[in-house]
Image: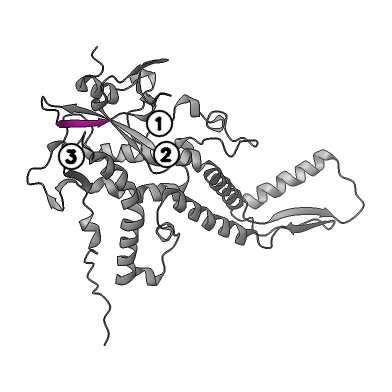
Amino acid sequence: MGLFNFKALAEFATAPNAANTGYVSPFSPTDSLSQAIVGDIFGYQTDVDYDAPISRAEAMTIPSLIRARGILMIIASQPLIAYKGSERLARQPGWLNRTDTSVSPQARIVATMDDLIFHGESLWVVARNSSGAITDAVRMPFEKWRVAVDGTIEVNVAEGKWQPVTDPKSVIHFQGFQEGVCTIGAPALRAARDIQRSVAARAKSPVPLLDLHITDDVELTSDEKALMRREWNAALRDPDGSVATTPHNVEAKPLGAEGTNDFLTAARNGSRLDIANLMQVPASLLEGSTSTASLTYSTSEGKRSELKDYGLQLWANTFNSRLSLDDITASGTRIAFDFSDLSEVPDDGVSAPTED
């Protein structure tokens, strides 16, 4: 069918249920079956291997990771520009900001960033004119391609059938600066999930664990004890359950009341720091609350600069370096994201602080 013709590849990359995988949206899970996680199929497991790869779907249930990913997706709103030295080319390559496919250039960057974040690599399929210049590009969903042992790119053309890409210039392989967080971040991400479950459990029953201590010599049967626990659990979950009465021979003793909330708060903050480090995002941008000082002109400007220099630029360099190679652009030219608008703090009507 002429698979390595751009039109056929683009249709293959964007078609629903192609190669029996069915992931079209960049926001859908894009994990190969080799990385399927038992917990995603059978529910919560108490004996999960913390070091085993985690699925993108499970990772995307962690609020701080969602926040970090959203911050990094600012890249997709920045234009890709072709330069000759430090000067912009008068005539920009049209494929940088337009496409003949059904996936917009912005969505192409978003999906590629998803691949780099979660898996550490991504693949584009490109069209070229008779002179070899690129005229269009589309991102290939992660589960539809792989790198063979000998380094050859292979495409999943049917269930269990992989076909090598015979023309290296028909694809662009992006390799990130680190492995995907689904692999290297699996322990930290699973810990974050456990912290969420602990917080949810405490929210469901916000009072400390209770010991219903019987003060006399009356021996209750197992059924009677179970009934007492059920009645107390139901009462505690009632909106008016903050006050209870106990029989004369029962004393409600709280267990683990000291320091539990402090521990959960510290654990959540530590988890946010772990996520920030994994995603290469300034930790201050994942804070749960914003102090008055962070609303000042100077602090906002500093945060924008820190994000650009130590977050976005690191991820952008994967694009900049690969798209500037001679198989993409003419010798002496380069392609890079233009972050100039991030260097300017928006005018919110509040002037910079000055001395009297």
Q: Would you say 201 lies left or right of 139 here?
A: right
The residue under the point 18% across, 39% down is: 96
Mark 1 near mark 3, Cβ–Cβ under 8 Å?
no
Mark 2 near mark 1, Cβ–Cβ under 8 Å?
yes
Give the dominant element type of the magenta stretch: helix, strand or loop: strand
Question: Which tag, 3 or 2, sits closer to the chain's start?
Answer: 3
Q: Nearer the viewer, mark 1 or mark 3?
A: 3
Distance from Cα at disc 3 to Cα at disc 2? 24 Å
Which picture quadrant has residue 48? top right
The residue under the point 20% across, 44% down is: 335
Residue 129 pos. (x, y %): 12, 26
Residue 325 pos. (x, y %): 23, 38
Which residue, as the protein is rendered here, is positioned at the far right?
A: 217
Specify start and end residues of the magenta stretch as a single range.
132-140
Distance from Cα at disc 1 to Cα at disc 3? 25 Å
Query: Looking at numbered disc 2 in the image, what kind of residue is underneath it?
Result: Phe
Query: Looking at numbered disc 1 in the image, what kind of residue is underneath it?
Result: Thr
The residue under the point 29% across, 25% down is: 13
Q: Residues within 10 Å of mark 2 (few under 14, many from 20)?
A: many
Q: Which residue is mark 3?
A: 96
Mark 3 near mark 2, Cβ–Cβ under 8 Å?
no
Residue 215 pos. (x, y %): 87, 56
Q: Which residue is mark 1?
A: 30
Which picture quadrant has residue 347? bottom left
Instruction: Look at the picture and state if 17 lies above or below 275.
Output: above
Look at the numbered disc 3 and give the secondary structure of its residue: helix
Q: Which residue is mark 2?
A: 118
Question: Which tag, 1 or 3, sits closer to the chain's start?
Answer: 1
Which residue, as the protein is rendered here, is positioned at the far bottom?
A: 356
Q: Residues within 10 Å of mark 1 (few under 14, many from 20)?
A: many
Figure quadrant of the N terminus:
top left
